[in-house]
Image (cartoon, helix red, strand yellow):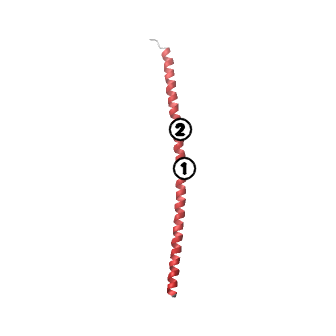
Amino acid sequence: LVGNLDSITLGIKGIEEAKEESMGALEDITAVSQEIATATEEITATANNQIDVVEELSKSAIHLAEEAKRLENAINKFRIS
């Protein structure tokens, strides 16, 4: 009977150790998941910022093309045929 109790006690201790290891691993996984979520938010913000910059550049390029056309038309008025 005492041998069985010792065996049960050892088994319970093993279960406790496994539980603690599992909890530690779960905490590590949670921390990594939070870091990934934070990094993803930062990447998304950067990507959105880059999209805004590209859109602004596109508008500027269109405006520049329009101004170049106006300049070309103005220069054509002064050309001698």
Residue at 51% over, 21% down: 71
| Label 1 Cα crowd, 10 Å radius (few <14 / some 14-19 / many 20+) | few
Q: Earlier in the sequence, mark 2 or mark 1?
A: 1
Amino acid at pointer 2: Val
| Label 2 Cα crowd, 10 Å radius (few <14 / some 14-19 / many 20+) | few
Is 68 placed above or below 57 here? above
Query: Marks 2 and 1, Cα distance to the nearest angstrom?
Result: 18 Å
Is 57 placed above or below 35 here? above
Q: Position of residue 2 (x, y in %)?
A: 52, 87
Residue at 51% over, 28% down: 64
User: Closest to the observer: 18 or 74?
Assistant: 18
User: Closer to us: mark 2 or mark 1?
Assistant: 1
Q: Which residue is mark 2?
A: 53
Is 36 placed above or below 47 here? below
Amino acid at pointer 1: Glu
Element assignment for label 2 = helix
Residue at 49% over, 27% down: 65
Q: Which residue is mark 1?
A: 41
